[in-house]
Image: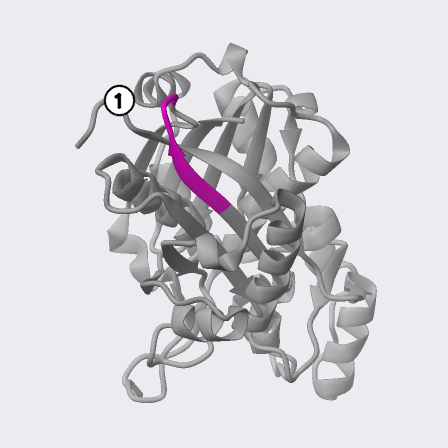
C-alpha cells in the first residue's frame, strides 16, 4: 500500500421518489388491509418517530434509484461514467439474487468497468466506503463509484391479526425508498480519515428476511430485540475518537442512521454530541436503510451546512447487529 496515496470524496448525491405518505395515512392503509385488527392510532409515530416516508413506483427496482442518484452525481461533478474504474453497489435491497445488482446498474449507466456488491444491511454503504478507500489506497483503482438503491417499503406487513404481529412488523412501517451515490478518487491528501466497526452477531436473528430457497427461516423484525442488542454495544466517545484519529469537537457535522428517533437521542446523549450538530432524517424521510448516511450528507452539502475542508462523521447501525463510524474531510 502506498503511504502517500489516499482517497477523497469528489461528490455525493441522493434521489427521492416523488410519492411521500404520512404515518397517519399508512395506519389507515393497514387498518383497511386488517379488518379484524384495530390499529392503535399514533402507535407507529410514537414508537419510531417516523412522520413520513417515500414510496417508489411498483415497477422501479433498487438499481433504478441508484442510477437516478448517479446521474445527478455525474451532472453535479462533471464526471463521466466512463471515468469510473469500479462500481460498488451497496444496499440492503437488490434487484435479483444473481447476478450482483452492480451489473444491472452498470448496464443502465453504460459503464464498462469491474463491478461488485457489498452487503451488510443498513451499514452496506459505510462498509463499501471502507472497501473503496482501501482499494484506492493500495493502487488498485483511481476512481470508484459507490451507489445505493433502497426499496424496502415494498416489504411492509399490511395485514395483521393481533398486537404481536403488529409489534413485530414495526420496523417495516419505518421503511422508506431512496437512492444515493458517491464518487471517490485518488488524492495526495486523505479525505477518508478513518473508520471503526464492531458487531454483536449473537443478535443476528433480531431481524431476518428469508429468501424463497430457505423456507426453514421465518420472517422476524423485532425492534425490541434490535434495541436490546444495540444497548449491549456500548458506544464510547473516547474509543471512537481514538479509532478515527480525531476529536469530536473538531467535527463540523454528524450524520446518523438508527432505527428510531428515540434511540438516536440516546446515542447523542451518550456521546455528548449536541443535536444542533447532527442531521437525522428518521422523522422526515423514514428509514432509508443504507441510503440514509449519503442522503444526509448530500442534504448537508446542498444546504451549505458543510464546506470544503470540514470534517464529517457518519455513524450507522445495522441489523446483525453492527455499528460503524467513518470520518471524512470534505
Q: Count the numbered circles shown.
A: 1
Residue at image location 73% in from the left, 37% down from the top: 302
Q: Which residues are magenta?
A: 183-189
Q: Nearer the viewer, residue 7 or 14?
A: 7
**Looking at the image, residue 160 lies above or below residue 225:** below
Instruction: Tell me residue 124's x, y (percent).
Output: 40, 54
- Of residues 314 and 51, the one drawn nearer to the viewer in this rendering: 314
For the C terminus, the quadrant is top right
Q: Residue at x 54, y 18 (%)?
A: 251
Q: Quadrant of the N terminus?
A: top left
Mark 1 residue crowding within 10 angstroms, few (<14) / some (14–19) / many (20+):
few
Residue 33 x, y percent position in the rendering: 72, 86
Main secondary structure along the magenta-highlighted residues: strand
Q: Is residue 23 above or below residue 272?
A: below
Q: Can you see residue 318?
A: no
Q: Is residue 63 left or right of residue 35?
A: left
Point 45% across, 66% down: residue: 111
Task: Decide if residue 291 is in sight here.
Answer: yes
Label 1: which residue?
4
325 horizontally vs 291: left or right: left
Residue 20: quadrant of the picture: bottom right
Q: Is residue 78 left or right of residue 222?
A: right
Looking at the picture, how far across and down is residue 142, in whole percent?
35, 43
Q: Is residue 7 magenta?
A: no
User: Horizontal and vertical percent for residue 159?
Assistant: 64, 84
Q: As displayed, is residue 138 above or below residue 121?
A: above
Image check: 312 left or right of 229? right
Name the foreground residue: 7 vs 147. 7
Q: Which of these two is toward me, 315 or 87?
A: 87
Secondary-structure class at tag 1: loop
Quadrant of residue 276 in the image? top right
Amino acid at each position: 500500500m502506498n503511504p502517500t496515496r489516499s482517497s477523497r470524496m469528489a461528490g455525493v448525491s441522493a434521489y427521492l421518489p416523488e410519492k411521500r405518505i404520512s404515518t397517519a395515512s399508512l395506519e389507515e392503509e393497514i387498518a383497511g388491509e386488517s379488518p379484524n385488527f384495530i390499529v392503535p392510532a399514533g402507535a407507529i409515530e410514537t414508537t419510531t418517530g417516523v412522520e413520513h416516508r417515500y414510496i417508489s413506483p411498483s415497477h422501479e427496482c433498487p438499481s433504478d434509484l441508484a442510477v437516478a442518484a448517479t446521474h445527478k452525481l455525474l451532472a453535479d461533478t462533471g464526471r463521466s461514467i466512463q471515468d469510473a474504474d469500479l462500481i460498488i453497489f451497496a444496499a440492503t435491497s437488490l434487484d435479483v439474487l444473481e447476478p450482483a445488482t452492480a451489473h444491472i446498474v452498470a448496464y443502465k449507466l453504460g459503464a464498462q468497468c469491474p463491478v461488485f456488491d457489498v452487503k451488510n444491511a443498513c451499514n452496506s454503504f459505510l462498509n463499501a466506503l471502507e472497501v473503496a478507500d482501501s482499494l484506492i489506497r493500495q493502487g488498485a483503482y483511481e476512481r470508484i463509484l459507490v451507489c445505493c438503491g433502497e426499496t424496502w417499503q415494498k416489504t411492509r406487513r399490511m395485514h395483521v391479526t393481533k398486537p404481536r404481529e403488529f409489534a413485530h412488523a414495526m420496523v417495516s412501517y419505518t421503511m422508506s425508498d431512496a437512492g444515493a451515490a458517491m464518487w471517490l478518487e485518488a488524492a495526495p491528501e486523505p479525505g477518508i480519515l478513518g473508520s471503526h466497526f464492531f458487531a454483536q452477531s449473537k443478535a443476528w436473528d433480531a431481524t431476518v428476511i428469508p429468501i424463497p430457497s430457505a423456507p426453514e427461516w421465518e420472517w422476524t423484525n423485532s425492534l425490541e430485540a434490535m434495541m436490546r442488542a444495540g444497548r449491549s454495544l456500548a458506544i464510547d466517545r473516547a474509543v471512537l475518537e481514538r479509532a478515527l484519529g480525531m476529536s469530536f469537537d473538531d467535527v463540523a457535522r454528524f450524520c446518523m442512521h438508527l432505527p428510531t428517533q428515540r434511540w438516536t437521542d440516546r446515542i447523542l446523549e451518550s456521546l455528548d454530541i449536541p443535536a444542533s450538530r447532527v442531521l437525522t432524517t428518521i422523522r422526515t424521510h423514514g428509514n432509508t436503510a443504507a441510503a440514509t448516511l449519503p442522503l444526509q450528507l448530500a442534504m448537508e452539502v446542498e444546504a451549505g451546512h458543510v464546506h470544503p475542508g470540514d470534517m464529517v462523521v457518519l455513524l450507522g447501525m445495522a441489523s446483525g447487529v453492527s455499528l460503524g463510524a467513518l470520518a471524512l474531510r470534505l
